[in-house]
Amino acid sequence: MATLESHFTLPLPAFDRPVRLLIVVAPFYRDIADALIGGARATAAACGAEVDLVEVPGALEVPTAIAMAERMARFDGYVALGCIIRGETTHYDTVCNDSSRALSLLGLQGACIGNGILTVENHAQAAVRADPAGHNKGGGAAAAALHLVALARRWSAPRGGLGFRPAEGTA
């Protein structure tokens, strides 16, 4: 059982300038969404990050909203939140796979995304995973986004001593 396992969690990164995160949530199961949001906000606050929140109709719209924000707004990272509970049809598989794939593709293009979209069999599993005092998957998604922001900032820093310099007085 997952509750008996122990996991290592990286310490949260420190930032020398403010971080702006966008939480994009699909609140289809409002109680689960609210718990995920609470965990994400608390983790962001622990790093001093500023948080904006938008709601979209469902998990399939979360990556689209993040892609729009990446093109049109100025956020350092994104936290994708929602919950997909298995139903009686294959729609569950489509929504799980397509939302996850789209988020992964955005990440591979350079967006700093923490994926906190739960994919579960029932509401009870979701409640345990969403609870900030339980598995805190919202907080984990925010932490993932913050770690990626820290890496992006580290690797985008100006590099010194490489390349050519113009001769003195010609620049």
Image (tube, rainbow, N blue to C red):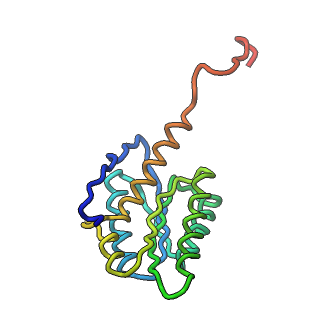
Q: Is residue 138 left or right of residue 93?
A: left
Task: Please name the residue shown 43% across and 61% down the image.
Answer: 51
Task: Please name the residue shown 32% across and 61% down the image.
Answer: 42
Q: In what quadrant of the picture does the N terminus appear?
A: bottom left
Residue 150 location, x and y as percent? 45, 44
- Identify which residue, 116 or 64, lies in the foreground: 116
- Identify which residue, 104 or 87, lies in the foreground: 87
Residue 91 location, x and y as percent? 56, 82
Q: What is the number of callouts on the image?
A: 0
Q: Is residue 107 left or right of residue 136?
A: right
Residue 68 location, x and y as percent? 63, 65
Q: Quadrant of residue 90?
A: bottom right
Does residue 170 lie above or below 154 as drawn? above
Farthest right residue in view: 170
Does residue 139 lie above or below 47 as drawn? below
Q: Is residue 95 left or right of residue 141?
A: right
Residue 53 location, x and y as percent? 46, 68
Task: Please name the residue shown 53% across and 56% down the image.
Answer: 75
